[in-house]
Image: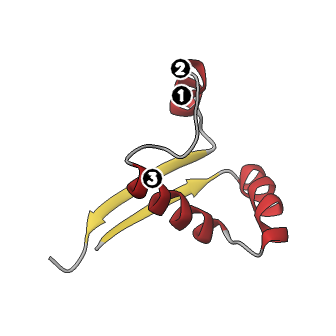
Amino acid sequence: MVVMVFEIDQDFYDKVSAVLAPQGLTLSDAIVLLFKKTAELGRLPFSFTEAELEAAKQSNSVRLISEYVEGM
């Protein structure tokens, strides 16, 4: 199992949580749905421009702090 730890800007977390809550979803639920759909399709389940991709890469709203494999 791979364990991933993210740091998320509080304001960004609050905005995303507010969008997800009316659907009964947590951030964790949404990430699982994103990963499952990405694996199913073999690509991200939405389109984006090159500019949006670059902006996402430069964003400080979400940052991977650590990733490691456990129990191997």
Badges 1 and 2: C-beta atoms under 8 Å apart?
yes
Q: Mark 3 points at which residue?
A: 38
Corner quadrant of residue 23 = bottom right
Q: Which is more toward the observer, 44 or 18?
A: 44
On screen, residue 43 versus residue 17, left or right, reads left
On screen, residue 3 versus residue 62, left or right, reads left
Nearer the N terminus, badge 3 or badge 1? 3
Identify the secondary structure beneath mark 3. helix
> In the picture shown, does residue 17 fall above or below 29?
above
Between the C-alphas of marks 1 and 2, the distance is 5 Å
- The dot on residue 21 is none
* Extreme residue toward the top, this view: 51
- Residue 10 spot, x, y in % from top left: 73, 55
On screen, residue 26 versus residue 19, left or right, reads left
- Residue 18 spot, x, y in % from top left: 83, 61
- The dot on residue 50 is 2
Task: Please name the residue shown 24% across and 75% down the image.
Answer: 70
- Quarter of the rendering occupied by the C terminus: bottom left
Dot 1, how many residues are within 10 Å of its Cα: few (below 14), some (14-19), or many (20+)? Answer: few
Q: Name the residue under label 1.
A: 53
Three-letter residue code for mark 1: Leu
Q: Which is more toward the observer, 47 or 55?
A: 47
Corner quadrant of residue 29 = bottom right
On screen, residue 24 versus residue 50, left or right, reads right
Between the C-alphas of marks 3 and 2, the distance is 19 Å
Nearer the N terminus, badge 3 or badge 2? 3
Three-letter residue code for mark 2: Glu
Q: Which is more toward the observer, 45 or 21?
A: 45
Corner quadrant of residue 24 = bottom right
Dot 2, how many residues are within 10 Å of its Cα: few (below 14), some (14-19), or many (20+)? Answer: few
